[in-house]
Image (spheres, rainbow, N blue to C red):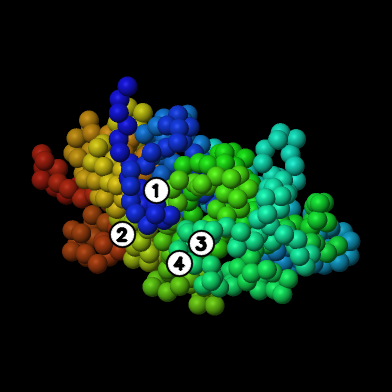
Amino acid sequence: MAEKPVLSLYNTLTRSKGAFAPIDPDNVRMYVCGPTVYDFAHIGNARPVIVFDVLFRLLRHVYGENHVIYARNITDVDDKINARALRDFGTEIANGTLSLNEAIRRVTEKTANQFHADIVALGAMQPTHEPRATEFVQPREDGKVDMITLIERLIERGHAYQAGGEVLFDTQSMADYGDLSKRPLDEQQAGARIAVDVHKKNPGDFVLWKLSSPEEPGWDSPWGRGRPGWHIECSAMSAAYLGETFDIHGGGLDLIFPHHENEIAQSRCAHGTKVMSNVWMHNGFLQVEGRKMSKSEGNFFTIAELLHEEKFGGRKWPGAVLRLAMLMTHYREPIDFSVKRLEEAERLIAKWPAGGNPAEGRVDESVLAPLYDDLNTVGAVQALHALAQCANNDPLMLPVFAASAELLGVLPKKVEVSKALEDSVESLIQLRLEMLKAKNFAEADKLRDDLAAKGIQLKDGKDPATGERVTTWEVKR
């Protein structure tokens, strides 16, 4: 049996990089926090989707497609969702033509469907499991872990208490609470969905269950009709599909505290385990054109807007370009998402061959080596570009390039060209050749650039027999 390559990953929990050793190499398990579907996903949300999609692909390459389980949740119960439902369907709710629950379902279905369409365009694979929070609130017929049962267990073990119409986690009950964020308990600050209330034993105690008014969505529970706090859902859903302890937990840097810190507290104290996940991975922050993305700053863009509207840089951007632009920065580093970066990614893709069959090739070691080093996609993209240059000159390298590009999820697609498009492009090429003969270089360059913007890449050369200028073309996206 061939020895597995050494995959080195940075672990936020230990603040160090080390060799990844799965609990069970035949059953490698990863959980990543997914979207809260109250609105369309923005470009910052795309980063963890892309980063952990590459890691999913890499783990499948190393351990086998049938030996990796990837769970990514959808949060469809949240006060922001309730507010969005009231905003969008307030009139219908008021006149009785729509219940709040029905309005919430419309909001979450629409936004979840858009999220799925967006990430398909970004080249992301479907995770093995995609549980929804609302499906794991109450005890389930299949016996999978649920939120109410977890909360009951925390109360029984002295880690949670009921007060002020809520059930709260007692942070003082866990000796090493704060180990992930490295924030001592006496320095924990309220904020980020933590409210300081007089009924709390400690300022850092957080909500596991809160009562719902008649106008709010709710579920029956031992503590009255209510709804879960934010953090408990991920503890339930990860345990339901991956077990009480698993290999990798991922998400954005902003989730370290309080969300991931509180997930660890809930899970470890409920199950009596030493760890929740052996490795914790977090991608860095994203800025847009050098500034923090914000609606008030006017630089807030959804994935759908970038794909389908001309709001960023005055044009639409292909999903492959958005994905590659993300991978051109190491996942732990901050990223400046800019028009310049997208243009650079697009120029790179334009130089890559299309049409290779990845099933006929092998992933080149030059691409794998940097990925084994803490998912260094920067080095992998550089190696892939060198492979592309080889494949452009040697058709035998095309399957190797294709297999390597597919591992990163950036394999160029061969586009079928209609006769009408072919005739149109050939006509424009002839027009451009006439411009060049007339030394009208500015207009010839403009025509070339206009075609490039539409995905038509021109390549000038000379006929070896006659020495005359010839132009070939291909569709790049």
CA separation in Å, label 3 and label 2: 41 Å
Q: Earlier in the sequence, mark 1 or mark 2?
A: 2
CA separation in Å, label 2 and label 4: 15 Å
Q: Residue at x 61, y 44 (%)?
A: 271
Closer to the camera: disc 3 or disc 1? 3
In percent of width and height, residue 210 lies at: 75, 61
Closer to the camera: disc 1 or disc 2? 2
In the picture of the structure, the residue carrying the numbered disc 2 is 344
In the picture of the structure, the residue carrying the numbered disc 4 is 312
153 to 307, vertically: above or below? above
Closer to the camera: disc 4 or disc 1? 4
Nearer-the-camera pick, 335 or 415: 335
* Classed neighbour count for the residue bearing mark 4: other residues with Cα under 10 Å, few (<14), some (14–19), many (≥20): some
Q: Residue 178 carries which label?
A: 3
Q: Residue at x 39, y 54 (%)?
A: 14
In percent of width and height, residue 296 lies at: 54, 77
In percent of width and height, residue 372 lies at: 31, 43
CA separation in Å, label 3 and label 1: 47 Å
Amino acid type, mark 4: Phe
